Structures are given as C-alpha cells and as structure tokens.
Amino acid sequence: MLTTRSIGIIAWARDRIPLQLIGALCLASSLLAGCHQSPPPAAGAKEAGAKEAGTKDPAGAKGETGAKDEAGAKDEAGAKDEAGGKEEAGAGVTLTPEQIEKLGVTTEAARSIDYTEETAGYGVVVAHETIAQAAAELVTAQATEKQSQSALSRAKRLSGTPGAVSADVEETAARQAAVDAAALTLTIQRMSSTLGLNPPWKPGENNATLQDLAGGRIKLVRVTFPLGALSGGIPASLRAAHIGGSKPDKSWKMTKVWDAPADPNVPGRSFFALLKGSDAGEGERLLVWAPIGESVAGVVVPAAAAVLSEGKYWCYLEKKTGTFVRTEIDTARPVPAGYFVTEGVAAGDKVVTTAAGQLLARESNSGSEPD
C-alpha cells in the first residue's frame, strides 16, 4: 500500500527517472512502511499472561489473609494474658495412682497463720560470767549489809541494860551499817548498768531468774535496732535466729524484753531479752526481728513446695484426685515454715511438698514418662 509520501515521490520523479527505477522505489517505500507497524501478539502468549496473573493474585490474597489471622491471634493471646493475672497456669498435670506413687508425690494441707510485718536488728549473747560476777557481788553486799544491821540493832536493844555495849561500840556499829548499806546500793546501781534499769525482777532481788542467768541456763541477749526502725515503746516479744540468711529454718521467741543501755559501737536503740531453750553460744551474734504493724491472716506454703519457672515462683495444688494445678505464689514474706501468702492458696488446700519439680517438668514437656 502506497503512502502519501510515496505518491509525492512518484509524481516528482516520473519525468526525470526511468520507469524501472520508479518501480523499485515504490517497492522499497512499501517495505519501509510495513516495518513501522508492531506485529499482533500471539494467542498463546495472551493465554500464558492471563494464567500468570491468576497465579500471582491468589498468593497475594492468601498472604494478606494469613497476616490478618496472625495479628488477630496475637491480639487474642495478649488479651488472655492480661485477663489471666497471677492465677493458675494451664490445665495442670493429671496422673494415675501408679504414676503418683512412682514419682513420689506427697501433699500437705496449707496451714492458716497470722502474720505481722517485722523489722530486723542484730543481737549478741552476753557471756554469763559477767552476770555471775554481778550476782555474786549483789549476794555479798546483801549479806554484809544484813550483818551490819543486825549488829546495830543488837547494840541498840541492849542499851541501858547490864549487857549494854559502850557508846563507842554502838557508834562503830552504826557507821559500819551505813557503809554496808551504801555498798549494797552501789552494787545494785552497778548491776543496773550491766542488766538494765527495769529487768523482770525487783532491783536488788536475788531471784531464780538471775541465778539461772548467772549459771548460763538462761541466756541474755543484747539487741540493737537501727535508728527509726521502731517507732513505739518496748516490743512485746522478739524473734531470734542464727545468722545465715533472711529465711531461717529455726528461730526462738523471746517474751521478756526490757530497755538496755545504748551500745557505744552500734547506733540505735538497744534492749535486753531472755533466751530460753536455744543452742546459741555465748558471744554469738544473732539476727533478731521485732513485730511492727497489724497482724494479717493468711496461710503458710512449705518451702519445699515452691518451684521457679518463667521468673516466678509457683506451687502445685491437688484440685481433685490425681489432678495438680500450678498456682503462682508471692515469696516476699518468708517465715520459718516456708512462705506466708494471702492469695492463690487457701487454708486446707492440698499443697504438693514432694516431687513438685517433676510435675513442673512434665507440664513443660521436659520430663520423661514413668516406667
């Protein structure tokens, strides 16, 4: 097909160029015009493109749907965690009687107690030699003063009778009685500097408690608390234990407490207390606690029941026969028998005290099945 340009070329050249050359030029012009047109796409190529687009679209839709489902699942899990709080973890572990016996699982009923916040101080067991020396001086001074008073009384009683003593002898007896009375008073005052102003016996009284202290049968503990630790008066009781940790396995209660002279080496407020039935040695330093605040009701979880998982402390409770559920506990308040808690465990609940670690391992799928 001839274009307008080709016709113009032919009209210009028909009088100047031979007819053979004109025909060749027309053929070349037709070929050039055909080269500028794009060939139509093949039918096979169209079909392949449609299939490729169809394949890519479902994959994109699936990826978008999967992302939405994953985000929804995460939101739902987060909401469940937030609602769960500090309570039970999972459905627990269910065992047959044979498995319970094989693992050696034992339980103990949670015991209710009243807990009182305490403040800590340090104490030292006073050597009984010091007390024995003071007690001996008291006995000597009392005996001497009694003898002097008896001599003076006898001299006064015989005055004016045939058996009367001379005035000089009577005056000497009076002077000696005054000296011995002063010596007794000094002994009592010296003892108060050693044993405090208000001990649980009358000043100057040589009673059984003082003799037991002098003999080492009862121990005297001098306790000092930091400044500001106690806001009230004299504590009604104290609790002492060997130094060895903040959660002692054994402690002793001291109910006789009175003021003591300040310790020049340790700033704070000092007390004396009587310690009975302990294995503390003389000169030994002890941890001592004094109650502060009001009493709170709760239960004791035995120390053997606590297991650590995910950065938290737990114990297992037997909710029904053979089913053990893990419950979070607060270990911030240790007591001699374990931990005092107010949530998660109630009085009478069956707490697993043996093989709690094996139950945790089975629950986390890290333990092996018993034979």
Image (spheres, rainbow, N blue to C red):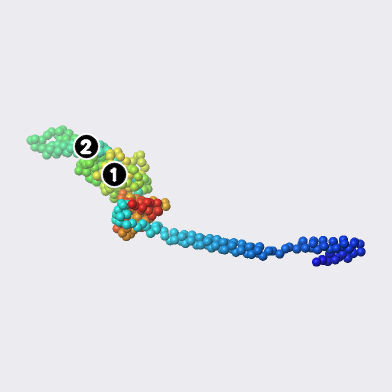
Look at label 2 and name its amino acid. Ala
Mark 1 surroundings within 10 Å by alpha-carbon count, few (fewer than 14), some (14 through 19), many (20 or more): many
Q: Secondary structure at mark 1?
A: strand
User: Which is more N-terminal, label 1 or label 2?
Assistant: 2
Look at label 1 and name its amino acid. Phe
Residue at the spot x=79%, y=62% of the render? Answer: 31
- 340 is higher (above) or lower (below) than 57: above
Where does the N terminus fall, quadrant-wise? bottom right
Q: How far is mark 2 from mark 1, CA to CA?
A: 20 Å
Q: Secondary structure at mark 2?
A: helix
Residue at the spot x=36%, y=53% of the render? Answer: 369
From this viewpoint, is residue 32 visible?
Answer: yes
Residue occupied by mark 1: 272
Q: Residue 50: image x %, image y %?
A: 63, 64
Give whichever of 254, 298 is nearer the camera: 298
Left or right: where does residue 6 sit relative to residue 327?
right
Q: Residue 172: image x %, image y %?
A: 17, 34
Q: Residue 265: image x %, image y %?
A: 35, 39
Give whichever of 338, 170 is nearer the camera: 338
Residue occupied by mark 2: 136
Outermost residue, left side: 162
